[in-house]
Image (tube, helix red, strand yellow):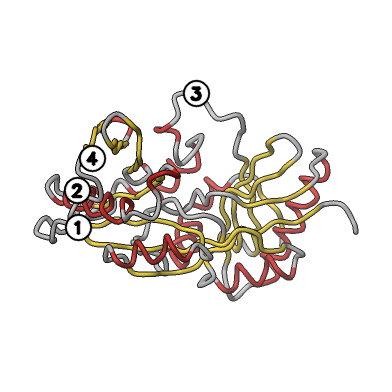
Amino acid sequence: MSFTTDLAGFLPDLAVLVNRSLVSVPPGWTLTPARLGVFLRSPSAWAVHYPEPPAFVKQDMGVVADGRLLAAGQYAVVGRTCYLCWLAADPGEPGALEELLEELKDLATGQGCDELAQSRNELGVGWFGTPLCWDHVFRGLREAGWEPGDRWLVMTGETDAAAPVLEPPFRSIRLDRSENPEALEWSVDARVGDVPAADCTLWGLPELFRDCPGCAEWMTLESIDVEEPFQRHGIALWLVGEQMRWLAGRGFRHVLLFTETGNLPARGCFEKAGFVPGPECWVMRRSLHPR
């Protein structure tokens, strides 16, 4: 096996590795080699949301044997942390993943990093870390000394313009919407009288999936926050319902969100709004200092 820093020369192989993983996580799309080539050159999967260039540069890494790409990923160093932006590997070649992770450790150590870490997975539509359904990747990380940190749950829901309208939790509540289609951002602020009560932000899917059938019908619910004085009054459930009807009226049919696995109140709220739990994702980390 040999190490490569040029994934662009292995785009068909990369598509096989990536698509084998992507089909198991909603929306379950596959990607063409051409789209992956554009993705490799992009500064960040979410660059459209941030006007300033990212404070890091993604670097390619891959393991090759007999002219075939067996494991691949990209990493970026920020401060003293080396972030694994995404990772894909052939489940039938565990040695290749082991080789790749060992090389990543050596690269990070050589650049003075204190730890290896995952964050938002650039290969997906927004979820964090490694989906547990990628068992060969998860197992490879654990065997290489990575440990789980934050745990997230992917949930999906369908919009419905005819869904029952919930009674507003406050009589004087109103919604102020802000739309920026070019940045793929839609947000709404809820106010009770003149007092901010809650806000909700929606994003379109990353450029990586632009060519996938039905991409324009999907949205991610990025955040929903309720101010402390207005919590436990049902405002989150009401706001989600309002957003789902609003999306349906604009041609969006599917919504995907990510919530902490242990946040049972949030999970309960989303399930009441019709969202269905999907794969769980764990954010993995590894210290580079011996204990």
Residue 80 drawn at (x, y percent) = 76, 38
The quadrant of the image that shows the C terminus is bottom right
Q: Disc count in the image?
A: 4
- Residue situated in front as seen by the camera: 62 or 159: 159
Residue 177 drawn at (x, y percent) = 24, 33
Please tell me which of labels 3 and 2 falls first in the chain: 3
Tell me if label 4 and label 2 are in contact, CB under 8 Å: no
Tell me if label 1 and label 4 are in contact, CB under 8 Å: no
**What amino acid is at disc 1?**
Thr
Q: Quadrant of residue 97?
A: bottom right
**What amino acid is at disc 3?**
Glu
How many angstroms separate mark 4 from mark 3 (CA)? 35 Å
The quadrant of the image that shows the N terminus is bottom right
Q: Which mark is residue 238?
A: none
Given this view, does label 1 or label 4 mark the residue nearer the observer? 4
- Residue situated in front as seen by the camera: 229 or 148: 229
Q: Quadrant of residue 256?
A: bottom left
Q: Identify the element where label 2 is drawn.
A: helix
Q: Badge 2: how crowded within 10 Å, few (<14), some, or many (20+)?
A: many
* Residue bearing mark 3: 52
* Residue 166 visible in the current orientation: yes
- Which residue is at 59% across, 52% downward? 73
Q: Which mark is residue 247?
A: 2
* Residue bearing mark 1: 159
**Relative horizontal placement of residue 12, taking residue 170 as reference (left or right):** right
Q: Relative to residue 54, is residue 148 depicted above or below?
A: below
- Which residue is at 76% across, 48% downward? 115
How many angstroms separate mark 1 from mark 4 (CA)? 22 Å
